[in-house]
Image (cartoon, grey):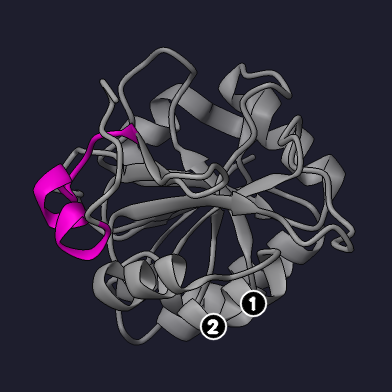
Amino acid sequence: MSRRFDVTQSDIRDLVLDECARVSETGNLLVIPTDTVYGIAADAFSASAVSALLAAKGRGRDMPPPVLVPRAETVFGLVDGVNETMLALTARFWPGPLTIIANAQPSLDWDLGDTHGTVAVRMPDDEYALALLGRTGPLAVSSANISGQPAATSADEAMEMLGDDVDIYVDGGARTSGSSSTIIDLTGDVPRIVREGPVTVAELRETVPDILDLDG
C-alpha cells in the first residue's frame, strides 16, 4: 500500500527524505514535488525502476524520462562533451524550468529507454526536490500522470492517477505553475527548442542567439 508524507512539516522533513532515499535505493517509485509539476521518480541507475516508472505512466521505452540533478556540476558526469552553450544555459536558467537534451556519457551503466545515446537533464528550483536529490543523486523523473492526462499539480491528483504503483507520495503543497519545463536539444549542430514552457524563446535567445524555435 502506498504511503503519503507531508514534507512541509519541518519536524519530520529529514526523516521523510531519508525514507524516500531508502525507498529509491531499493528500486521503488516516488512521487515528488518539483518547481513545475509533480513528478514520478525512480533511481536513474536502476533499469527495473525506470521500467516500472514507464509502466506506471503507460509509456513505452520510446519515451524515456528526463533526469533531475542536485547541482549543475553533475552534468559533467552525465553528459559527453559539456560545451560553452550548455554551461551558459545552466548558469542562467538552473535551478529552474529548463530541460536540456545532450549526448550522454557512453560509459554510464543505466537504461532510461530508447534514448539513442542522449540524456535530458534538469536541476529543479524546489527546496524539497533538491534536498531529496542531494541524498539520492540523479533521479529519472517524469510528470506524475497517466500518459495523455494532464500533469499532476498536487499529491492528490497524482495519487488518483497512479495509485499503488508508487510507494511514497511526497506532499509539498500545490504546484501553481501547472506548466512543464521548456526543453531544448543541444545534440545537433544548432540548438533547437523541443517544447515551449516557462523559459521563453526570447529569454533563451539572450543566451543562445542562434537557437531554433519549434517552427525552425
Residue 136 in percent (x, y) is at 65, 74
User: From what the image shows, is residue 90 above or below residue 11?
Assistant: above
Specify start and end residues of the magenta stretch as a single range. Answer: 194-208
Residue 152 in percent (x, y) is at 32, 34
Secondary element at tag 1 = helix
Task: Please identify the quarter of the rendering in which residue 12 is found.
Answer: bottom left
Q: Residue drawn 14% across and 46% down?
A: 200
Q: Residue drawn 60% across and 66% down?
A: 20
Classify mark 2: residues with Cα within 10 Å, few (<14), some (14-19) or many (20+): few
Residue 71 in percent (x, y) is at 48, 80
Report which residue position mark 1 lands on.
Answer: 76
Residue 126 in percent (x, y) is at 30, 69
Left/right of residue 46 with respect to residue 103 in the rendered view: right
Residue 18 in view of the camera: no
Image quarter where the N terminus lies is top right
Classify mark 1: residues with Cα within 10 Å, few (<14), some (14-19) or many (20+): few
For badge 1, the amino acid type reads Phe
Task: Please identify the quarter of the rendering in which residue 57 is found.
Answer: top right
Report which residue position mark 2 lands on.
Answer: 73
Image quarter where the C terminus lies is top left
**Front residue of 177 and 31:** 177
Q: Is residue 200 magenta?
A: yes
Residue 102 in view of the camera: yes
Left/right of residue 106 with respect to residue 202 in the rendered view: right
For badge 2, the amino acid type reads Glu
Query: Is there CB contact under 8 Å for labels 1 and 2?
Result: yes
Secondary element at tag 2 = helix
User: From what the image shows, is residue 125 above or below residue 135?
Assistant: above
